[in-house]
Image (cartoon, rainbow, N blue to C red):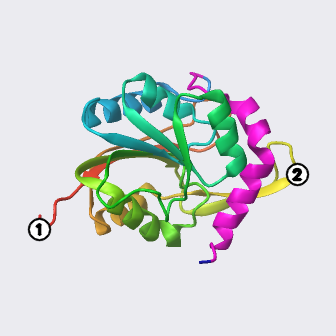
């Protein structure tokens, strides 16, 4: 099956910029790129999932920053990304963690096999019209009592096009999703929104509000 243009563009973009991206953001979580609210949602996800509950996945893991954080909290975590170059960066930085190839609409997991999913700014290159397809796949792999954490740039669904991503001359388009639309799409695909927040831009690299949604699987028949 041929990938949509936004998927092939994102893969090519991050293949070309993986080293530059990792140099910019690092391979571990830092206060320069995650504020107090951000870290609070990650901590809440860890507590909801629980360290003995089963496997979790960091989908769109990039250089493995969140993957490494989850592993350090004792979770059985695997990182997933669509960019082979980014996966190499993550594996080199975190040799004790498993990383696999996959994309938001084609995850390498069996139905109902994952206890928790983190998509930390992973939907920012996905146009709004594809969100239902993404969330249906996330729900497919989540267990009946699984948890999902989303982080994304908030807006009205507009696309922001960069012609020189990370100083490489590569073009990438990011989408600033409307939180209400994201929440509706989650519900439509069998996920219940448990907590959500939008904070003002406060870090040096931010120019738009940042949104966070914690959701959980809805058992059939509810």
Spatial distance from mark 1 to mark 2, Cα to Cα?
Answer: 50 Å
Residue 7, quarter of picture: bottom right
* Residue lying at the far left of the rendered structure: 221
From the image, state whether disc 1 or disc 2 is nearer to you: 1
Q: Is residue 183 visible?
A: no
Residue 208 lies left or right of residue 104; in this view the side is right
Image quadrant occupied by the N terminus: bottom right
**Dot 2 corresponds to which residue?**
169
User: Which type of secondary structure does the marked residue at label 2 adopt?
Assistant: loop
Identify the residue at horizontal 46%, vertical 64% (top origin).
Answer: 134
Identify the residue at horizontal 75%, vertical 55% (top origin).
Answer: 13
Q: Is residue 211 visible?
A: yes
Identify the residue at horizontal 30%, vertical 49% (top origin).
Answer: 215
Bin the neighbour count of mark 2 within 10 Å (Cα to Cα): few under 14, some 14-19, many 20 and up.
Answer: few
Q: Which residues are magenta?
A: 2-31
Residue 95 lies, in percent from the top left, at: 59, 29
Residue 39 lies, in percent from the top left, at: 44, 28
Q: Nearer the viewer, residue 113 or 160?
A: 113
Bin the neighbour count of mark 1 within 10 Å (Cα to Cα): few under 14, some 14-19, many 20 and up.
Answer: few
User: Which type of secondary structure does the marked residue at label 1 adopt?
Assistant: loop
Q: Nearer the viewer, residue 145 or 172?
A: 145
Residue 203 lies left or right of residue 89; in this view the side is left
Label drawn at residue 194: none
**Dot 1 corresponds to which residue?**
221
Q: Earlier in the sequence, mark 1 or mark 2?
A: 2
Image quadrant occupied by the C terminus: bottom left
Q: Is residue 26 magenta?
A: yes
Tag 1–tag 2 contact (CB < 8 Å)? no
19 up-or-down from 13: above or below: above
Q: Is residue 48 magenta?
A: no
* Residue lying at the far bottom of the rendered structure: 1
């Amino acid at each position: 099956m041929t990938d949509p243009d936004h998927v092939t563009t994102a893969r090519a973009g991050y293949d070309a910029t993986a080293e530059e991206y990792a140099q910019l953001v690092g391979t571990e979580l830092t206060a320069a790129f995650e504020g107090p609210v951000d870290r609070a949602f990650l901590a809440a996800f860890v507590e909801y999932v629980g360290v003995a509950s089963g496997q979790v996945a960091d989908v769109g893991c990039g250089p493995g920053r969140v993957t490494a954080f989850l592993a350090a909290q004792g979770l059985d975590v695997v990182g997933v990304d669509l960019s082979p170059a980014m996966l190499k960066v993550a594996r080199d930085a975190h040799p004790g963690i498993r990383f696999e190839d996959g994309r938001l609409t084609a995850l390498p997991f069996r139905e109902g096999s994952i206890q928790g999913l983190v998509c930390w700014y992973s939907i920012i290159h996905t146009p709004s019209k594809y969100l239902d397809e993404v969330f249906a796949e996330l729900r497919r792999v989540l267990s009946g009592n699984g948890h999902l954490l989303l982080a994304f740039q908030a807006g009205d669904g507009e696309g922001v096009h960069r012609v020189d991503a990370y100083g490489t001359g590569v073009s990438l388009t990011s989408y600033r999703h409307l939180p209400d639309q994201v929440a509706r799409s989650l519900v439509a695909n069998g996920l219940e929104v448990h907590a959500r927040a939008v904070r003002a831009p406060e870090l040096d690299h931010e120019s738009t509000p940042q949104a966070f949604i914690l959701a959980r699987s809805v058992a059939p028949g509810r």
